[in-house]
Amino acid sequence: MTSRLFAICFNATRPRDLARFWSGVLGRELTHGPDGDVAVLPPDAAGFRIRFLPGQEPKTGRNRAHFDLTSASPEDQRRTVARALELGGRHIDVGQLPEDGHVVLADPDGNEFCVIEPGNKFLADTGFIGALACDGTQEVGRFWSEALRWPLVWDQDQETAIQSPDGGTKITWGGPPVAPKTGTNRLHFELSLAADAGWEAETDRLISLGAKRTGIGPGDSGRELMLDPDGNEFFVRRPR
């Protein structure tokens, strides 16, 4: 049984505050999980949660992943930006040009995200979270396509993108040059297995695709820490 993307997780200095920010920006419901975590629920059963976990990772440069939020019109883009600023976000400069149509912001914990201008064809029909845009190699994009069994919807010039067969948010990797990894990523994937899935068989499959075990977990959390081919952390939840 293939793993499914259960959540995009943020390691946050103030998980509850950050969860309230993203719940307000996205207009989605908050929930408190059995493990003491806080999560923003997906809009439908096919989507993923956004979980907020305690973490004190220092900010060392830009995150390796960020959300791209879509806009239906210029007014819609302005409303999203205004709502994010009211909730505690701020404008940041990452080298964008004055003529660029997207707006670059940071959430209250310093995590970057973009509000994309209307008319972006690549993100058409993806939903409000158009993409999780990642720094990464072609190899890692192809790994995640196989790991999740999400088809590649872009694979050119060493850039890759995948999307669930059910549609929704795309996950993209920009190709080289990829900045060296320093410390633990603030954002990571969390995979889950069906109750009747074979844990060892699935982790062995992920390893055969290029993942590595770290020897950490699952422990009391029921999650095992692994690394993808670019060295990014991700967790696999044991069935309960």
Image (spheres, helix red, strand yellow):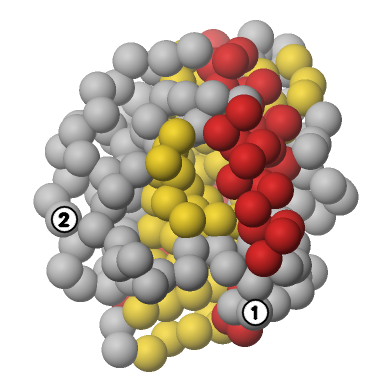
Q: Residue at x 42, y 14 (%)?
A: 13
Would you say residue 75 is visible in this rendering? Answer: yes
- Image location (x, y in percent) of residue 111: 41, 36
Q: Which quadrant, please, contains the N terminus?
A: bottom right
Q: Which mark is residue 179?
A: 2
Q: Nearer the viewer, residue 26 or 187?
A: 26
In three-dimensional space, the C-alpha distance between marks 2 and 1, rounded to whole angstroms, equals 30 Å
- Image location (x, y in percent) of residue 169: 65, 62
The kind of residue on which mark 2 rests is Ala
Pointers 2 and 1 in contact (C-beta within 8 Å) = no
Q: Is mark 2 on a helix, strand or loop?
A: loop
**142 versus 148 height, above or below:** below
The kind of residue on which mark 1 rests is Gly
Q: Residue at x 24, y 22 (%)?
A: 58
Pointer 2 or 1: first along the chain: 1
Which residue sits furthest right? 44
Q: Residue at x 42, y 25 (%)?
A: 109
- Mark in front: 2 vs 1: 1
Which residue sits furthest bottom? 156
The quarter of the displayed image where residue 42 is located: top right
Q: What element carries label 1?
A: loop
Would you say residue 232 is visible in this rendering? Answer: no
**77 versus 160 height, above or below:** above
Q: Mark 1 points at which residue?
A: 119
